[in-house]
Image (cartoon, rainbow, N blue to C red):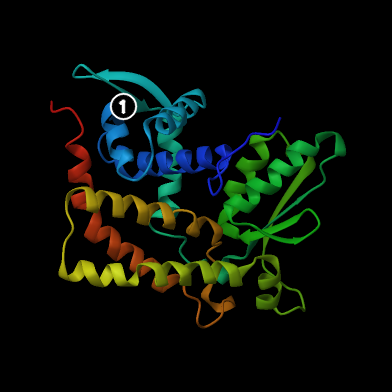
Amino acid sequence: MPRVTKAGSAPAAQVNRQSRTTVVTFLGAVVRPLGDWMPIAGAIDLLAQVGLDAPSVRTAVHRLKRNGWLDSETRDGTRGYGLTSVARSTLAAGDEVIWHARKPADLADGWCIVHFGVPESMRAKRHQLRAHLSHLGFGNVGTALWIAPARMRDAAERAVTELGLESHAAIFVGGYHGTQDLTELLYSSWDLDAIDQSYRDFIAAHSALATRLEDTAPSGQDAFATYLGVVGQWRKLPFRDPGLPHHVLAPNWSAPAAVALFEKLVADLEKPALAHASAHWPSS
């Protein structure tokens, strides 16, 4: 029988995804700067302040532990979880994009092109490679043909190698010498209008907050909840942005203004948010 949900409530799978996303944001924005370890009771108390109940937190933590992100670890007699090397390396790689955004590439460096011909018997891996390239910020030029700034070559090679598709993929780096207008080509390879709109939406949603913070510095729970919310809403945006050279983007490209706003919010909120969170950690 299909699962019955209350009217107006989100399906369980969606709730679980949202819980996991919030917990991952918490790990990157709070747990890492506080020593790569969290007390489970303190984490549950903190995440309740942003709307997650204890069962949702425990489920998300259990899945992250099963996926190799967390190890059980007791500190000062307090039960908790430490970030594994897998989690630390993944979060560190994400930090380069989330906290600094992708710097615009240099047009003179050229482009990385990935072409693959994966047989039907390996369809699942073909879909995985497409999803991985898209997540890395590659644009789709045509059938099994993906493009990104040349600096993404190493990331493309890792994606291909991790899936064991070395014999089914080719990677090229070079300049563009076609006759089609490059800006037109790139705008058809990415949904740059949608990416730009996501930045504009972020600006519209948080400009008033930035203005309020100029007059009143939040503290305690408000700072923590606001900080985690801002980071959670921001963190997915830079991953969609391939960081294309300024020369090929529309003059009113909104990423620089959005990045500046995000950095201002972090500067105002991070310190009081982490001070509030650290009070839930055991004292040494």
Q: Residue furthest bottom?
A: 251
Looking at the picture, tell me which residue is in the foreground, 268 or 136.
Answer: 268
Query: Could you say whether the residue bearing mark 1 is in a helix, strand or loop?
Result: helix
Residue at 30% across, 30% down:
37
Q: How many residues crowd around disc 1 within 10 Å: few (fewer than 14), some, or many (20 or more)? A: many
Q: Which residue is mark 1?
A: 40
Kind of residue sitting beneath label 1: Ile
Locate residue 178, reporting x and y percent.
Answer: 76, 74
Q: Quadrant of residue 166?
A: top right
Residue shown at the point (29%, 30%) measured from the top left: 38
- Image quadrant in which the C terminus is located: top left
Give percent across and percent down for residue 208: 31, 72
Quarter holding the N terminus?
A: top right
Seen at 46% across and 32% down, the residue is 60
Residue 149 rendering spot, x and y as whole percentages: 59, 62
Q: In the rendered image, is residue 201 in sight? A: yes
Q: Which residue sits furthest right?
A: 120
Specify the quadrant of the image occupied by residue 128: top right
Q: Is residue 282 left or right of residue 81?
A: left
Q: Looking at the image, is 247 positioned above or below residue 86?
A: below
Q: Is residue 227 left or right of residue 181?
A: left
Q: Does the rendering let one see residue 36?
A: no
Q: 96 above or below 38?
A: below
